[in-house]
Image (cartoon, helix red, strand yellow):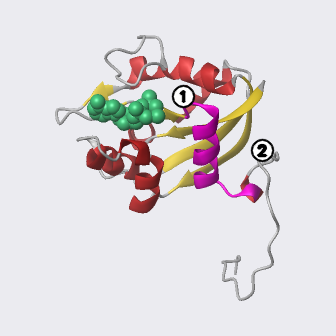
Amino acid sequence: MSEAALILIKPDGLKKSLTGNILTRLSETKLEIVGSKMVRVPRSLAEEHYKHLKDKPFFNEIVQYLQGELHDRKKVMALVYWGEDAIKKCRDLAGATNPEEADPTSIRGSYGRITTSGVYENAVHVSSNPSEAEREIKLWFSPDELIVDLYPKKEVVEKEFKRKLWA
Ligand code: IDP
Ligand code: MG
């Protein structure tokens, strides 16, 4: 069944110039990229993204990690991959959460590390199941930023809506 997965190239992946390597590995899936952008991550977005881990002792560290506070790279690359079994295909290529336990040929096994303070720096995020993918994609992307209709959407007319145009 076709499904979507949110991929984030995390700040360590960007700092280590791994964007090309990671996208090349993900291209092995033959999935379609239906959205992509660079994002500066406010704390509120990082906290919402990792809200299922709110009670973990490492919550604050992974929120800072996703914001780029540990890497002097305050951005992530967000992508939506779409196609047959997208989540499993992308997670298999990403490898296990703990980069020390990940298959050495996987993305996380190749490029991840555990910092001395104990954060699993594992270069990529991949949605873990279809409902998490939907929650995450709606959090990171607006409907107009995706080239396919993944989820039901509505049109609204906003009055006095302020946005930037090229001068
Ligand atoms: P996932 O990214 O493989 O889906 P999650 O359990 O959702 O794994 O954890 C989110 C992120 O939090 C991981 O990718 C990793 O960066 C970090 N993390 C998870 N578990 C630990 C841990 O036990 N110690 C340190 N960091 C962790
Ligand atoms: Mg997860």
Secondary structure under badge 1? helix
What residue do we see at 42% from left, 23% from top? 108
Determine crowd level at label 1: few under 14, some 14-19, many 20+ residues with C-alpha closer than 10 A: many
- In the rendered structure, does residue 9 fall within the stretch colored magenta? no
Secondary structure mostly seen in the magenta stretch: helix
Count the labels in the image. 2
| Magenta span of residues | 127-143
| Position of residue 94 measured from the top left corner of the image (x, y, whole percent) | 51, 23
| Residue holding disc 2 | 150
Give the camera-side residue of 15 and 116.
Answer: 116
Q: Quadrant of residue 79?
A: top right
The mark found on residue 22 in the picture is 1
| Position of residue 115 measured from the top left corner of the image (x, y, whole percent) | 23, 32
Position of residue 158 relative to residue 98, above or below, is below
Q: In this view, does 155 lie to the left or right of 57?
A: right
The mark found on residue 35 in the picture is none
Mark 1 belongs to which amino acid? Answer: Ile
Q: Quadrant of residue 62?
A: top left
